[in-house]
Image (tube, rainbow, N blue to C red):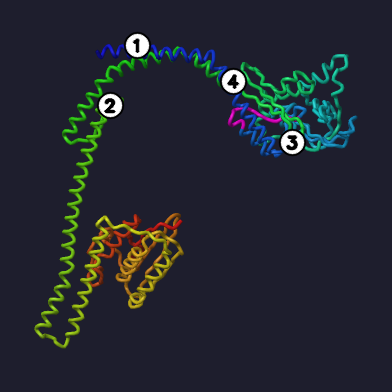
Amino acid sequence: MKKGIVLKLFLLTTLLCMLILSTIFIGQTIFFKQYYANQKVNDIETGIQSFKKEYLKAEEDVPAIQKLERDFYKEHATWITTLDSAGNIKYANDFSVKVHIISTKNKDFMDSDITIPLYSFIGLEDIERLKFNLEQGKNIMIDGAIKDDTVVPVILTEEDGNFTLENKLLSKKLFGNRTETEPSTKKDLQIFLIGHIKELQLPEGTIRSNIYTNRVFIERIKQFQQNLLFNEKPSSNAKTMDYEINNINYKVLIRPIKNNNGETTYIFAMTSLQPIDEAVQMLEDYYVYFIIFVLFLIVLASFYYSKKIARPLLQINDTTSKIANLDFSETIPITSKDEIGTLSHNINTLSNTLHSYINQLQQDVEKEKQLENTRKDFISGVSHELKTPLSIMKSCISILEDGVASNKKDHYFKAMSKEVDKMDMLIVDMLELAKFESGTYKMKMDVFYIDQIIEYICEQLALDITNKQLHVHKQLSKTKVVANQHRIEQVITNFITNAIRYTPKNKSIIISTIEEQERVKVCVENKGAHIEQENLEKIWDRFYRGDTSRRRSKGGTGLGLAISKNILELHGAQYGVSNTEDGVLFFFYLNKKE
């Protein structure tokens, strides 16, 4: 049964692939080239319509029009420009020579300036000799044609005759063969001018440089200008034409339009069909290799079909065996929507469900262990921390009961009151720490100025600072932050109180805020003894006193930094402690208000 199905699939695949190859080959050799050409012309036609609207809207704004031409080329891979009524490229002043007319039979041009485009005479590769022969002040003779009061120069000759530029295409039509004795029949179009050069403009790095280097494009413009001047093939003025040179096919599109002044302007576009010609030729040459490659793929497909049914079943068996041993690391890939695919999906769902329940059970067990450890730590810490004040109070009560030192009753009562206050403070801190570590506490965020909070806390602690004769230096910036104001006050109070506690008399405490791009760093640095490197991380632990400088007599419950750590972690804030050159720096970051 399996061999029959595989054979049928093999034959079906072979026939299908051969049919597809035949269809593609016929389509490429007969239909695709024509389809591509028609589609590209239609796209360009649509683009020209948009270009026309934007061109008329630009109203002689040269940079805007040149940008339109550049964008059109990028979008359609088609050269485009605008021509005036005489067939000259408009706005070609960057590759031109300005001449002041000093002699002519046509009085309309006497003592006037005309701009002669040079692209129809010479290519950019010959620019260097132009700079010498068309220097400012030199006299030049102009033979040309006149069309709609526009001079179309055909031959430019230096006065001494040593230098000549000629548009040969127009020259032959306008003046004929100069060896012939018969006069030209185009004398009504001819005009002769003499003038001196005022300015030479060359396209060095201008936007139009690429157009001037495309000689095929320029030659088609010159051919169109010839037809326009001599009324040859007038219907071509608004047609799409085919053009071939050097075995490359081109499409030329010419569309006349009326500008806002009523003058006739032409949109002239040309695109190459060379890419599709090259692609089709290459595909035809390599079709033999394509067929061999497809046959090879068909052979591979037959092996694939032979394992299409057996492989999923074997994989299902392996995966279910692992699930039976509580190994859920492997899932069955679903490659079909048939019964095998449905079975694979159901097994994967069962595996994921079992895995999630077992993971949840393990997490619950770990959480219970953690809670048990927390309870043990809590009881151990409370027992340890309450032992000393209870011992002191017990001693005081015994002394008072025995009547010893009855004259110091006030002293012993004051000592017991102090120890009660310490136990009260310890219990409040322990309860607050337990609340933070429960995982259920949610921070409510406020927006406030961090510098105002620091100033307020310093005022509250001013008496402690003065009693110890400390110098507090503040470097604060007026910055809004997003955080829980009450809890951040608690953190800063803990940091500053800690600094006051461990800073020697007459030393300094530096409180600063450092602004970064999206957050602010709050720093509290106190001068004094360093913390041992191995103890830097331990100081955040509850009841930690790493050395004699941090003994119980310094005051505090040993929970301030642990509480601060939990508050900052609930904020998702980065925090830390480090030794400085002559002290210890505590810091944390808060997000700035946007």
Q: What residue type is labelled 1?
A: Leu
Q: Can you tell which of label 3 and label 1 is closer to the viewer?
A: 3
Q: Distance between the residues labelled 3 and 1?
A: 68 Å
- Mark 2 and mark 3 lie on one chain; the one further toward the N terminus is 3
Q: Which residue is drawn at 56% across and 17% down?
A: 33
- What is the x, y in percent for residue 357? 21, 41
- Mark 1 and mark 2 lie on one chain; the one further toward the N terminus is 1
Q: Residue at x 71, y 31 (%)?
A: 127
Give the residues drawn in magenta, as a range: 72-84
Instruction: Indicate whether residue 74 is drawn in magenta.
Output: yes
Q: Residue at x 23, y 35 (%)?
A: 329
When asked about the image quadrant of residue 461, the answer is bottom left
Question: Label 1: which residue?
Answer: 11
Viewer-side residue, 214 vs 240: 240
Question: Label 3: which residue?
Answer: 260
Q: How crowded is mark 1: few (under 14 residues within 10 Å), some or many (20 or more)?
A: some
Q: How far apart are marks 4 and 1 (CA)?
A: 38 Å
Residues tagged 1 and 2 counted as in contact (Cβ below 8 A): no
Dot 3 falls on a residue whose secondary structure is: loop
In this rendering, position of residue 96 left or right of residue 327: right
Residues tagged 2 and 3 counted as in contact (Cβ below 8 A): no
- What is the x, y in percent for residue 223? 73, 21
Instruction: Indicate whether residue 73 is drawn in magenta.
Output: yes
Question: Label 4: which residue?
Answer: 38
Question: Label 2: which residue?
Answer: 341
Q: Which amino acid does label 2 sit on?
A: Gly
Q: Is residue 35 above or below residue 512?
A: above
